[in-house]
Structure formats: C-alpha cells, structure tokens
Image (tube, grey):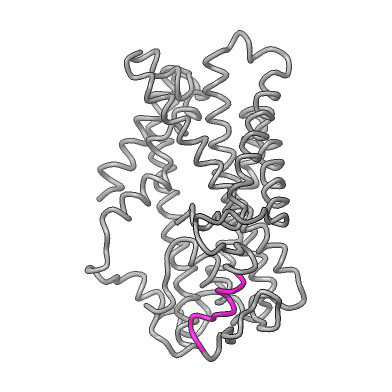
C-alpha cells in the first residue's frame, strides 16, 4: 500500500523535479518556488547528518569482513578476551551469548551508559577512514566516477545475493523459514515500519533523486526509468527476504527453536543473527566474507549517493566559484574530512547508545 501510494509517486515526482530544473536539492526549489528553498537546505542537512551515522555502520561491516578471514570465526569461540563468564556456544543456547559478546564487547565495546563517552576504538576508526576514502574516490569526478563505480557496487551484490539465495533454499528447513516470511503474523505488522522501509529504501523526500534526476537529459523518459527502478528495488528486497529467511529457517531447525526466536530486524539481524547462522554452514568463512562484502558494497552505494547529493547541491548553489579547476574536488575532500572527524564520535564506546 505504501509502495503504490507513496513510494512510486514520490520517486517519480523527485526525479522529474530534478530533470525539469537541472538543479540539485536546493536550487530546484529556488527555481520552482523560492518560498520552499528552506526545504532544500533542510534535506541536505539531514543527508549530511545521516552520512555521519550511516558510515559508522559501514565501519562495523568492514570489521566483520576482515574478521571473517581468520582461521576460525571469532564469534564462535568462548576463549576470547571479550567473552564473559556466561558466554555459551550457540549449539546449547539461543541466542548465542558468544555472538552477542563479539558484537557488543568486541566491536562496539559498549560503555556503561550514555553519560560515559569512553575512548575511540581505533580499529573501527581505521575502518571508518577506509570507508570515507573509498567514498571520496567514487564521487570525486562527479557522475562520471559515480556511474563507473555503480557498475560494480550496484551489480556485484546481485551476484552475491543469488549465491546466498541458492545456498539458502537448498538447506534443510529452508521451506519453514520461507513460509514464515510469506505468511507473517498480522498482529505483528506495524504500519510505521512499513512506511519507514519504503521511504528509506527508495531514498525519497531527502533530495537524492532530485540530484540524480538533474543529470538526465531534459526529454528523458523519467517516468519509465522511475517505474523500472522501483520494481527492481522492491524485487531485490523480496529476493533478499527469501535468501535471509531460508537460512533462518535452517537455523531454527538446527537449533530446535521456533523461527520467531531467531527472526530479528535491523542491525541485530545483520550483525548478530546472520553471523551466527553462517557458522552452521559448510565453509562458514567463505559465506561470511560474501555476506559482509555484499553489505559493504550496498553501504558504499548509499553513502556516496548522499555525498554526491551534498556536493551537487552546493556546486549548483555557487556554480561560478565551485566549477573552476579542482574546487569541486576540494569541496568534496572538505566534506569527507569534516564528516570523518565528526564520525569519530560514532566509533567511541558510547556510540551504540546514540544509535539507540
């Protein structure tokens, strides 16, 4: 319902707005109605703040990705320095306290409360720096470099998703998970969550689509492009559900627990449940690397989209000054440096409390 009434119409509206004005998220409103220019500034500030917190999750994914290359996945052992006395192996208890300990005590190193800042976690800080360096070089030449980067970051995840999909549906108990996915409990459906999913997955009402639409030719069929992109987006989400829930079904059968006990949403699914699930598969390191590499590519894709939106909006605001020489590249570097410095707060021991 949200897809038909909000997702597709707003996607078409924002894309056509950028295409018609050939301007980014701020100047498009000045051309249409100067009274609404403040909405453009507000949307760009939201994107800027969102980039700072979003890239911290990308840093988590990088840390999990690098940890997956170890001889034994670090979240399946109870003999690590971050484990507590009550850590248990996942075959005896669910959820595995060892998997939770790795996420909370090794990756996040959660402080005792929001009033305790704690120290910077330098391994996460390096992953944060790596994320911003990659994003910078994906965007530094504008849509030319962004388009080339997208050929890989937007297409290769489909290869990994297909691999995870076929691996999942061939596992015992996969049908149990797929049934749970296709026939949800109506009493647990939340309209607010459905709307949030549509707005975030389609990146609408923030200025992303206005920015990318501004690079279209004036006579481009944006209605057709928007419709196909919306179908591709929703189709990918549905296929991802099959890939995830088939493995969760296998996990519930293997553990002997109801699937509702293992099905979780948000970061808990990505960084606690799924890492625990891959340990049940043959070659767990390989599937863990594939999964987190897919998460990294998707995260970078969304990150440099927001960065491109900020840079394009500022460049369109001061074209005579910022389109000379390497000033656009310097502006991009300045944004990345400022965001990275502010993002250091998101890799301290108090960062998890700010996400909550």
Magenta residues: mostly which secondary structure?
helix
Residue 1 horizontal/vertical position (percent): 25, 50
Placement of the C terminus among the 4 image quadrants: bottom left
Viewer-side residue, 210 vs 313: 313
101 is within the stretch colored magenta: yes
Viewer-side residue, 8 vs 199: 199
Which residue corresponds to the image point at 58% horizontal and 44% vertical from the top-left? 301
- Outermost residue to the right: 71
The magenta span reads 93-102
Which quadrant holds residue 20?
top left
- Outermost residue to the top: 320
Quick check: 292 left or right of 35?
right
Q: Is residue 354 above or below residue 15?
A: below
190 is within the stretch colored magenta: no
Viewer-side residue, 223 vs 114: 114
Which residue corresponds to the image point at 62% horizontal and 56% vertical from the top-left? 118
Quick check: 237 left or right of 327?
left
Residue 332 horizontal/vertical position (percent): 65, 28
Q: Is residue 292 above or below residue 35?
A: below
Which quadrant holds residue 37?
top left
Which residue corresponds to the image point at 73% horizontal and 78% vertical from the top-left? 72
């Amino acid at each position: 319902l949200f897809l038909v009434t909000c997702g597709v119409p707003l996607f078409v509206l924002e894309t056509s707005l950028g295409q018609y004005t050939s301007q980014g998220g701020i100047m498009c409103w000045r051309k249409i109605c100067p009274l609404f220019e403040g909405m453009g500034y507000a949307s760009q500030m939201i994107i800027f703040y969102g980039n700072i917190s979003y890239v911290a999750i990308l840093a988590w994914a990088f840390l999990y990705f690098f940890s997956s290359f170890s001889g034994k996945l670090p979240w399946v052992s109870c003999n690590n320095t971050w484990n507590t006395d009550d850590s248990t192996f996942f075959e005896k208890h669910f959820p595995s306290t060892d998997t939770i300990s790795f996420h909370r005590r090794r990756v996040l190193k959660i402080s005792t409360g929001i009033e305790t800042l704690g120290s910077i976690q330098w391994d996460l800080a390096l992953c944060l720096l790596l994320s911003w360096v990659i994003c910078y070089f994906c965007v530094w030449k504008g849509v030319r470099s962004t388009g080339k980067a997208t050929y890989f970051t937007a297409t290769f995840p489909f290869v990994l998703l297909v691999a995870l999909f076929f691996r999942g549906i061939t596992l015992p108990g996969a049908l149990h998970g797929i049934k749970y996915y296709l026939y949800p409990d109506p009493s647990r459906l939340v309209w607010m969550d459905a709307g949030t999913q549509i707005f975030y997955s389609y990146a609408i009402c923030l200025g992303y689509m206005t920015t990318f639409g501004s690079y279209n030719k004036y006579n481009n069929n944006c209605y057709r492009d928007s419709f196909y992109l919306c179908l591709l987006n929703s189709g990918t989400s549905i296929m991802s559900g099959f890939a995830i829930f088939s493995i969760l079904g296998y996990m519930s059968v293997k553990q002997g627990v109801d699937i509702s006990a293992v099905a979780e949403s948000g970061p808990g699914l990505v960084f606690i449940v799924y890492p625990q699930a891959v340990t049940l598969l043959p070659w767990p390191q390989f599937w863990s690397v594939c999964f987190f590499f897919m998460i990294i590519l998707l995260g970078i894709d969304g990150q440099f989209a927001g960065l491109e939106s900020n840079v394009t909006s500022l460049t369109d605001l001061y074209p005579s000054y910022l389109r000379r020489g390497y000033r656009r590249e310097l502006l991009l570097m300045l944004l990345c440096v400022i965001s990275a410095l502010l993002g250091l707060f998101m890799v301290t021991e108090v960062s998890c409390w700010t996400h909550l």
